[in-house]
Image (cartoon, helix red, strand yellow):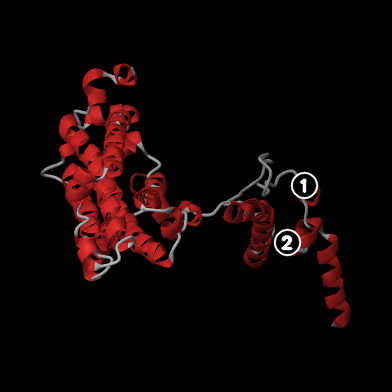
Amino acid sequence: MNTLALLSCFCLLVNPRVSTGFAPASKLSARDVRSQVSSPDRIRYAGESQLWSANEAVNGDILISGLDKKEKTHSSNITDEIIAATNDGPSAATQQPQSTESLPQSQAEEEAKPSFPLVLWRFSRPHTLIGSALAIPSISLLAAPTYKAFFTTRTLVALTYAAVPSLLMNLYITGLNQITDVEIDKINKPYLPIAKGDLKKSTAIGVVLAAVVVSLIMSVCNPVFSTSGLQVALWGSFVLGTVYSLPPFRLKRHPLLAAFCIVAVRGTIINAGFYSHALSAAFSSTKEAAAGFGVLHCLLNDWKCAFSSLFFGVFGIVIALMKDVPDADGDRIFDIKSFTVRIGQKRVFR
């Protein structure tokens, strides 16, 4: 019985037509299959486009004449393994880098977005902040009776108390202008935070509202440093800055009214207001003396205050003319009738 079983196994191994069905998948190659399959048979081998003549081939299975159903199934499984090894290997190798080469676009944009403090700094229009920060001590120095009187602790406190609400008011005015000019800025100044998409409009509104509320409160809450001059400077800037940008007033659409707002703020209101504040808060020994240094009194009776207001008033006219030159394209599209739109950029330069 054992001898008969051994003889049967030997015959199976020797017969090439049958041994193909039992060959290990790892040792089965295209050359082995072609050498072991006789000419009447046919095979479609995975990974090769050539078809050999055969009796039957379905879905890439190797079907060999003379094999029973069980052997054919086993042979089919071997071929499926070869197909999987041939097709899946390269695709997995090529797909792996695709998942790590590039990040999703939204994630990349999130990583490239600047921090909020940097966005807020750009939103404040730093060149205007620097100008206001330099103007307050310069005007106070002009109002000082002596240089020694300027370099005192009281003067430093008076300057600081004036600078904080003034810079906040500056943030309100420039921020309000950006909020109302988003579509125009997308053409004229696409680098600004709201137009660029770095700052949400709702966030910008919250920032400017907080700035103007704190600024106006500081103008009236301190009995010593909330002088009439500081109140004129802050409230006057608030009113003119609001009607300049905010509908339905939007005085910036009319060149003469827009120029009036700029000249009034840059000339009379800021210079006379902070000059009066310096005399009242820093250089007056009594409250009675401080009360006598109102804005109108300084303009009419102090030549230094009058001269600085006149000088910066003329400078404000230059600002009103030149600031719109680079904005001509957007202003023309959105019907902002500035001097530049009306007479042309070259004529404004001349």
- Tell me which residue sits at (10%, 44%) in the image: 248
Which label sits on residue 323? Answer: none
**To which residue does mark 2 refer?**
21
Q: What amino acid type should be assigned to the residue bearing mark 2? A: Gly
Q: Could you say where residue 97 lies in the image, as x and y percent from the top left?
A: 63, 53
Query: x and y percent of residue 279 in the render?
Result: 29, 57
Where residue 254 sits, quadrant-wise, is top left
* Residue drawn at point x = 39 percent, y = 48 percent: 138
Query: Vertically, is 319 above or below 87?
Result: above
> Which image quadrant: the N terminus?
bottom right
Badge 2 marks a residue whose secondary structure is: helix
User: Mark 1 = which residue?
Assistant: 34
Question: Which class describes the residues within 10 Å of circle 1: few (<14), some (14-19), or many (20+)?
Answer: some
- Give the left or right position of residue 4, taking residue 141 as reference: right
Is residue 179 visible to the viewer in this orientation of the structure?
no
Tally of numbered tags: 2
Q: Secondary structure at mark 1?
A: helix
Answer with the quarter of the image where residue 217 lies: bottom left
Q: CA distance from mark 2 to mark 1?
A: 13 Å
Q: Residue at x 47, y 54 (%)?
A: 114
Q: Are marks 2 and 1 in contact (CB under 8 Å)?
A: no
Foreground residue among 9 and 217 = 217
Closest to the observer: 81 or 220?
220
Q: Nearer the viewer, residue 342 or 215?
A: 215
Q: Is residue 4 left or right of residue 39?
A: right
Residue 314 horizontal/vertical position (percent): 28, 32
Furthest toward the left, the residue is 248
Q: Which label's residue is closer to the chain start, 2 or 1?
A: 2
